[in-house]
């Protein structure tokens, strides 16, 4: 089956990252991986969750949502259903964990940064696009805090990005779109930092299994893709900094 | 106090309406009134709510949401809180009522069109921008149904738009931004159709009252504004039709 | 179609207002507009909602409910369904706004008055009967605070009442009962104060529109009706004061 | 401590039962035990709960609610809190069980009667007043069904009433008001039918216990009281029948 | 119908009580009445509910749950349904009340003991097994507090146990299993203390009634059974103390 | 730091698996990994979820819960809080996915097997113990269906087990207890089948990262452990089969 955007197994979809897209948020990024588009904002609060009060440490957390018609057919609005699905909660926990590896929470001080990832259009890979955009929004929010003099030194200690990969028709491929994802034997999401260290590996066979070799091939594809995404993140932050 | 965008009392903020913005929805519109930006989609279902089954009539309904950081400070996500606020429900009922006056539900047949209005950025007037954009999304969805041969004749029977007005510092003004809205003595929302007929009038004094004269002045401002918005709606639909 | 109680277009249904009906509440009123009967209580709290703490200002808020069998057929109990409908929330927000225009919240001091409007029987006009009765209950609660020496001077600054009107069979009529309301082309609710100033105007065409002339005629009917209701409110408060 | 209404240990508070109080319900009763007042309606549905479908049997169920200001200080509205308390659910289960002993559910046929007990004012004994009034409302609803020809023969097979009793200051007393109830060592609720058979016995010591002798004395008081209540129920139904 | 375990009307099912079964809880008991098995833990908190703060008094409360497949067919998990049933709430209120009669809450001081009763297997009598096991868990938790020196003197003032009884086929029997319970004309639960004082009596006829004689016979059976259960409770506590 | 049970890095805690522990469930297993104890039941339904109706395919799903006092300090009951946490939902989705790889859903036919994993005591590794025990319960439930003649041939196609591993103090270790888990730099859960194929890999660094070498070492440890667990699963099923 030919891949969308005439890609081969190791090619990313067209990726764009636009920092500073939100008028009000301290940090923001509109990220697209092909037809998947996510609006990410980073909001700074002057307080931390109860379990961190008086510890001197800050916190980074994430929420995730999808507009009802981000997809081929409309999904009921979670606010109307009155609860977030297990999938939503799983994704926002993943985003939060990934982002917390990029920042020294003690240097952040007793403040919280809330990352909101709202999917405007979904064509596969919304969680990896969210993490990749969220790093940009978080970095911009931290720069805002430095510019305002709230932070003297940057608490940023690492740069993360994420990509999906999978086994489709027996072959390892990177950055699956919705159609590939639906038919994949194995579905994986990899989060790495710019130094090539692993942050999170999730590989799942639903009604299928995979070998250690396949696992290795997926990791290799992911590593190259994440290196490319990290370069684009730096570029987006520089473009924004020049414009500001 | 000078108005934003150097406007006088009867001037709208810069308005843009872009039809066909969503990849998946049958109809869509990105509408902006100044810094207020709302993404509207119209989704067609092959069924109707239980109370209309086997009546031969269709239905149009609306849902409204706001991204957590659409505003100056972050609002908790309604999906996370587990319920929609009274304000959200009031707005989505208003949008639904307004749109149902534009369509012959018997001609639509037993199908439902769900309008989703998601506020990306909010600077006052989100409900009137939503209604104005929703008409465009609904009209495009109906055209999609006609193009696919699902509908032989158009069920559209009217065109509606909406605008806010109010009494600020004793003076009637149109299209209030957030700052004006916060300080207004009277806050009004007017829905009219392209023939100048009234669809909905809501005028509210919180800790203040207003005279029949003031009411009249607000209506006059609204009528001129709505005429202007209706022209822009037609233009957006024509631009989209030409491009399609 | 002849109107209930052999009324003409501008006639109210028989109205009764009985202050001091509740054994425990600081203020109360049993109000009936024809067969619509609402029990209103005003309860005084020694605290205010968080957003008003340490401001020196008080608050007035309202809640609205309907007994399950207040209507022709039984409605599920909102407490059993686990949430209040959009309609309920819209009505209680309206009642609260209307009542807050009658009182100087700074003179009330840091206390809250909660108005509960519980519909015992519903035959149209429950929200306007609620507002009209709520003014009486609120005024009585303020008198209770004065009598107890909690308030030295009265914070009451205005008197409000409300009435429904509409376009039925092309004609403007006032104080619609349930049957008229179900068939009305336009449904309106008007809140005014005793000085003839407007507090809230809500006019709604569902699957219909209305002209500015029709709007004017409804306002004229409402103004006369509200003048009559205000006289009955004063009478109810005087009757209670004499009996106390 | 002298008892309210100058009663001795075995005296009921003034009891009134007014059948047919609701304009819309098939059966209804306004019941008062002293200052406790409960509005009871009986609503007939043409269907039964899923577990009884196609069994030929009917159902009787009950719901219970309390107006927020039925009591000395205001209680939050259960509809606003989004759930019914354990106490509410316990009471409505009790009312339903008691009423189901009065009716042959097979003779009722596949229909459901929903009893709503809404407490307008609460001064102790709301559950026993509810049961006592509910019997009257249920009997009236059955008569309505017979008068309409829906039922050929009456399914009523027994008459129930209920009363509270307790141990206060070491002495057994009947029909406790709120103040007595708050200070009682033992709190009991007894449901019996007009033939002197027991339907439900609930005796509870909170931070106290009781002897079999005390239990016997409470039962004796309850039996006499219930005989008296049954006579009043018959009287209320006859008064209503004469007036109809 | 022969009774399970070849019992006669007055015989308990095999009863086991094993104290100290939980690795982490301050007190615990695995209780079985025949095939009914309940795991009870008693957890000590250093705080009390808001209504007791700064009173010097402690609190004992209980929660009750049933594993989804504790019964013949699987019941939906209450955590997944999002609310506890009326039955669950009624039972946990009963357990809490019964336990609070065994302890001087002032001597306990400002701490709370939470009793969790989780039914592993249910064959009738889960609430009476819970109460009987809960006393053991509570007593052990208090001993833990004494051993740690938190409490100088024991606040325990009584010993309670509970048993079900009922009228089955016209005959009074004790300790009903699920099958008997399903067919019983009258269902009763009795809580008594080791001194023979009554703590709670609940006797319920669903679609049936009972006489005072039948009531007396059930009480007589219950009293003998509870005496036996109290002996087993003491034995369980002694066995644990010896082993500790 | 010495490991619990005097283990080295590659040693499992004492593992026990007891099949057929539940009186009512079609399949069940009490599993312990050291002090972690989980009661697993498998319940067979005669229906499938709506999305599978009339497809001829069956379904396996899982739910997970933890008794409030399974842990060192008491956790609020999810049924009382009214919702399942994100963690709970993440775990039950994982268990369901893992189990579905062991069974041919078409051969199962239109029936559903619900796996309930209830943690009685938690000392780390509850999700991996759950999966390991769930395989045993599922296999027993399938045998029950075969014994009853409902299934002619076994739909079981694979055997899965799961184990946690992690990086603690820089070293890769297997089967972490709670204390190790709390201090681990990297936390991983691996699901494999008896043929050495991977089913799910989840490796997470919270506030830490890991190298591909470390990943490899964790996988190697997990593979040996899972081989050992699979042997124990077969033994448990054989023991049960011999006893039945």
Image (cartoon, coloured by chain):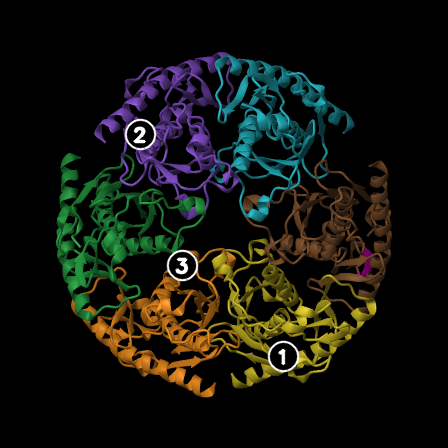
Chain colours: A green, B purple, C cyan, D brown, E yellow, F orange
User: Is B127 left or right of E82, judged from the image as shown?
Assistant: left
Q: CA distance from mark 2 to mark 3?
A: 40 Å
Q: Which residues are magenta?
A: D170-174
Disc 2 with disc 3 on a shared chain: no
Mark in front: 2 vs 1? 2
Q: Quadrant of residue E114?
A: bottom right
- Give the SS element for disc 2: strand
For image coordinates 36% across by 36% down, the residue present is B150
Q: Residue furthest bottom?
A: F242
Along the horizontal axis of the image, is F12 left or right of B207? left
Q: Which mark is residue C16?
A: none
Residue behind mark 2: B31
Kindly state the secondary structure of the residue where label 1 is placed. Answer: helix
Circle 1 packing at 10 Å, graded few (<14), some (14-19), many (20+), is: many
Q: Residue at x 78, y 53 (%)?
A: D156
Quarter of the image for the C terminus of chain A: give it.
Answer: top left
Q: Residues within 10 Å of mark 2 (few under 14, many from 20)?
A: many
Q: Are marks 2 and 1 on the same chain?
A: no
Q: For the residues carrying marks 1 and 3, which lies nearer the camera in this image?
A: 3
Say which of marks 2 and 3 sits in front. 3
* Residue F142 located left or right of residue D46: left
Q: Position of residue C217 (x, y in %)?
A: 56, 13
Q: Are marks 1 and 3 in contact (CB under 8 Å)?
A: no
Residue B44 in magenta stretch: no
Residue that carries the numbered disc 1 in the rendered image: E233
């Amino acid at each position: 089956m030919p891949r969308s955007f005439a890609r081969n197994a190791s090619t990313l979809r067209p990726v764009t990252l636009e920092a500073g897209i939100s008028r009000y948020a301290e940090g923001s990024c509109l990220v697209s991986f092909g037809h998947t588009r996510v609006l990410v904002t980073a909001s700074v609060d002057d307080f931390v969750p109860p379990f961190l009060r008086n510890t001197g440490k800050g916190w980074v957390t994430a929420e995730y949502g999808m507009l009802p018609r981000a997809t081929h057919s409309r999904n009921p609005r979670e606010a109307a259903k009155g609860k977030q699905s297990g999938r939503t909660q799983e994704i926002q926990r993943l985003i939060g964990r990934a982002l917390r590896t990029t920042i020294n929470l003690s240097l952040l001080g007793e403040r919280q940064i809330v990352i909101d990832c709202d999917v405007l259009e979904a064509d596969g890979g919304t969680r990896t696009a969210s993490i990749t955009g969220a790093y940009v929004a978080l970095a911009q929010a931290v720069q805002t805090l430095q510019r305002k003099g709230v932070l003297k030194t940057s608490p940023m200690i690492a740069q993360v990005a994420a990509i999906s990969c999978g086994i489709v028709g027996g072959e390892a491929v990177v950055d699956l779109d919705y159609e590939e994802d639906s038919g994949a034997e194995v579905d994986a999401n990899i989060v790495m930092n710019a130094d090539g260290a692993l942050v999170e590996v999730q590989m799942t066979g639903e009604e299928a299994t995979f070998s250690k070799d396949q696992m290795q091939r997926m990791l290799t594809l992911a590593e190259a893709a994440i290196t490319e995404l990290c370069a684009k993140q730096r570029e987006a932050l520089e473009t924004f900094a020049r414009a500001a």
